[in-house]
Image (cartoon, rainbow, N blue to C red):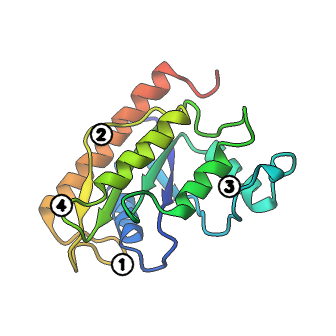
Amino acid sequence: MARYKVGYLIGSLAKASINRQLAHALVRLAPPELELVEIPIKDLPLYSYDYDADFPPEARAFKKAIAEVDAVLFVTPEYNRSIPGGLKNAIDWASRPWGQNSFARKPSAVIGASVGAIGTAVAQQSLRSVLSFCNSPQMNSPEAYIHFKPGLITPDGQVTNETTAEFLRNYMAELHLFIVRVLTVLPRDV
């Protein structure tokens, strides 16, 4: 059984983020073929092309962490109908300098939770646009916009609603199948 390492980025920098809770749930519900590891973004300075000749240590470590995974899962909130600035900053670091885009040909998926009724639908569309430019093959289905209600997911990632748990379990199973398909057609070592 092949195992795949999936790095996940949490768009919120808040310690008590509901998207952090969602990420913990996804780790618990992932099939055994997926090993999930968080790739932190909170310590990255603001990106500027002035750094392109010599990235700071935090940015080098971030790019290395992305290089070491087979796929990337974005778990993001929606801020002002878009993605959080910290997440966009992380993507900018990973996609630079020009010609060294860490997301090129790397499978990705997007999910998010919000207290709003439409979840993170608009932020996810904004993020998908950025990932398209970064040449990252994206899992487009199933879409997952989680309407978060108090108690839906515990801080340690227990999903209290079985219908939601089953949906998320299926989402992670689909992510596994997507990664297999992409890496069969676009092997990482080529």
Residue 174's disc number? 2
Q: Earlier in the sequence, mark 4 or mark 2?
A: 4
Q: How crowded is the residue under tag 4: few (<14 C-alpha within 10 Å), some, or many (20+)?
A: some
Residue 62's disc number? 3
Q: Earlier in the sequence, mark 1 or mark 3?
A: 3
Task: Tell me the quarter of the picture where residue 178 sits.
Answer: top left
Q: Earlier in the sequence, mark 3 or mark 4?
A: 3
* Label 3 – label 2 distance at C-alpha: 26 Å
Q: How crowded is the residue under tag 2: few (<14 C-alpha within 10 Å), some, or many (20+)?
A: some
63 displayed left or right of 74: right
Residue 132 visible somewhere in the drawing: yes
* Label 4 – label 2 distance at C-alpha: 15 Å
Task: Tell me the quarter of the picture where residue 165 sits.
Answer: bottom left
Front position among marks 1 and 3: 3
Which residue is depicted at the point 26% across and 45% down?
Answer: 143
- In the rendering, at what x and y percent does residue 31 appear? 34, 48
Residue 155's disc number? 1
The C terminus - image quarter: top right
The N terminus - image quarter: top left
**Which amino acid, mark 3?**
Phe
Q: Secondary structure at mark 4?
A: helix
